[in-house]
Image (cartoon, helix red, strand yellow):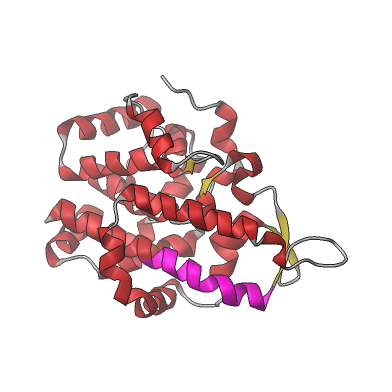
Amino acid sequence: MRLIPAFLLFLPQFVFAWGANGHRIVAQICYDNLNPTARERVDAALGDNYLAQVSTWPDYVRAESGWDFASPWHYMTVQPGQTVADVVHETAADPGIFDVQEAIAFMSSVLRGDEAARTRLTELMEKNGADPLAGSLDATALAFLVHFIADVHMPLHVGKNRDLGGNRITVLYFGDRYNLHSVWDTQIIEQERLSFTEFAAFVSMHTRDRKADWAAAPPQEWMRESVDLRELIYNTLYDRTDRESGLPDFGYDYQHDYLPIVEDRLGAAGYRAAAVLNAIFG
């Protein structure tokens, strides 16, 4: 069995891929692109909850000890010199669920009605004392699936553990100190001062011409895209430097250059999540 070192489960890199609004944006785009049958099934599974509302639940329950077993499901570590295919190959022979790409496949199987997968998730929750979302296995799997698809589209979340996915890199963002990861998971989005529904509408308007191409790409391609963008972020890190502190200094020029990438990743995640659910539910 491939063991996950205990300390990795609590590293800041693995807390959030997108902030709350990033996940809501992805879920809103997903919901807006569901076919009627899939939307009916999603609504039935969630009851009085909205998809955008429950999309943040998988991060919130990480504060509960019963959900510790799911911590590795939120991320994938792809070290320099590795490829996504290398990581997939390393874990393929083991029946455990070690990273986000395996978790996406697992939750998809649960929602397809695979009895072995449904029994496995039920037993994991019972064994660890974890409560399902809204008392429903389907709602739980649905929230996790949409959340995980969003996770792999945040470039620094398909990370390298040397710098904890950018958490150890201090930068200036509009004059305030943040770590690089938080700039990408939250600050670039929040700087636009939009509600998640407004942001989702803008992203959809800007990206709808690429919907079909994005939706057709297989999951490993989603992660390969994030690795490529991760390297772009690192390689341009010191293009802007504060003379006094020597720290990377991000302002309106950085926002201008990288907001389109953030929009693309959120749009791709939303369209791909919708395509997955449309395929599962018919």
Which stretch did the figure color magenta?
A: 251-267
Q: Main secondary structure of the magenta part?
A: helix
Q: Nearer the viewer, residue 16 or 40?
A: 16
Q: How many marks?
A: 0
Find out whether residue 254 is within the magenta segment: yes
Q: Left or right of 106: which side holds 176?
A: right
**In the image, what residue occupies the spot 32% across and 71% down?**
210
Give above or below for 19 relative to 66.
Answer: below
Residue 137, visible in the rendered structure = yes
| Residue 237 higher or lower than 77, as above or below | below
Which one is nearer the viewer's eye here, 142 or 43? 142
> Residue drawn at (54%, 52%), measured in percent from left and top?
156
Q: Residue at x 70, y 52 (%)?
A: 169
Q: Work out which quarter of the rendered image holds the C terminus and state it.
A: bottom left
Which residue is the extreme one toward the front? 81
Residue 264 coordinates in the image, percent (x, y): 43, 68
Q: Which residue is painted at 37% across and 32% down in the image?
A: 89
Q: Residue 11 location in percent, x, y? A: 60, 39
Q: Quadrant of the N terminus?
A: top left
Residue 160 image point, x, y percent: 57, 42
**Which quadrant holds residue 255?**
bottom right
**Magenta span contains residue 122:** no
Above/below status of 66 relative to 207: above
Does residue 242 appear left or right of residue 54 in this picture?
right
